[in-house]
Every structure is written in structure tokens, then in C-alpha cells.
Image (cartoon, helix red, strand yellow):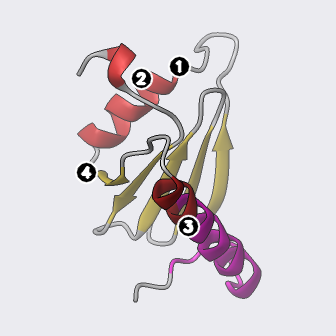
Amino acid sequence: MARKNIAFPQVLKNAEMKSVAIIYWNHTEYFTCESAHPGFTSWNGEEESPYDPFNELEMCLGNGYKFVHTPACYDKDNERIAELEAQIETMQEKCPEGGCLVVS
């Protein structure tokens, strides 16, 4: 996968773990339900291990995540991103753990 051909944010989903990862240029947000640490986690790197969105993408793909969509400069994709963000916001507000996914 050529790094220059990837646009961010990227939204990935792991159906088995009922998890969603949104990878931005400067951080990644994980929304998990069935994992060791359910809820919301934001990762933006550490001193010993600086954040790299391409490494996060490769790690997620290696852990069973699949692309939800591929962002591009189209209104349709921007609308889909807004829908996903609204769904995640609702999920955080309604889940006692702060991040359970509701599979429709």
C-alpha cells in the first residue's frame, strides 16, 4: 500500500470485536465493546513510540479491521463521515461504558 495514496481520516470496523477505529493524521480514536478495555480510547503516540497514521492503519488491518469507506473529496463521502461521527456520538452518550456499538 503506497503511503501517498492514502487519505485521512480512515474509518475501519472490526465486526468480531465490535470495534470501530477512526484514524486521523495526528491521532486514532478507538470505540470498542468486546475487548479488554471497552469504551473510547484516543491514541496520539508517546515519546518512545511517536504516532504515525500509516503504522496505525497497517496495525488495524493486521488485527482484522476492514475499511468502512475510503475518503475522497466528494460530498457523498463527507456525508458518510458525518453519519459515522453522529452514530459514534450517540453511542458514547447511550452506552453505560461510554463506547458500546449498536449493530444495525
Q: Which is more N-terminal, label 4 or label 2? A: 2
Q: Label 1 amino acid?
A: Asp
Q: Secondary structure at mark 2?
A: helix
Q: CA distance from mark 1 to mark 3?
A: 23 Å
Which residues fall within the magenta stretch?
A: 81-101
Q: CA distance from mark 2 to mark 4?
A: 15 Å
Report the disc number at residue 84. 3
Q: Which mark is residue 55?
A: 2
| Mark nearer the N terminus (3 vs 4) | 4
The three-letter code of the residue at mark 4 reads: Gly
Q: Amino acid at mark 2?
A: Asn
On the picture, is 48 further left or further right than 73? Answer: right
- Amino acid carrying label 3: it is Leu
Work out whether residue 68 or residue 92 is closer to the camera in this orientation and state it.
Answer: 68
- Residue position marked by numbered label 4 in the rendering: 64
Q: SS of the residue at dot 1?
A: loop
Towards the viewer: 23 or 8: 8
Image position, residue 52 (x, y; %): 53, 19
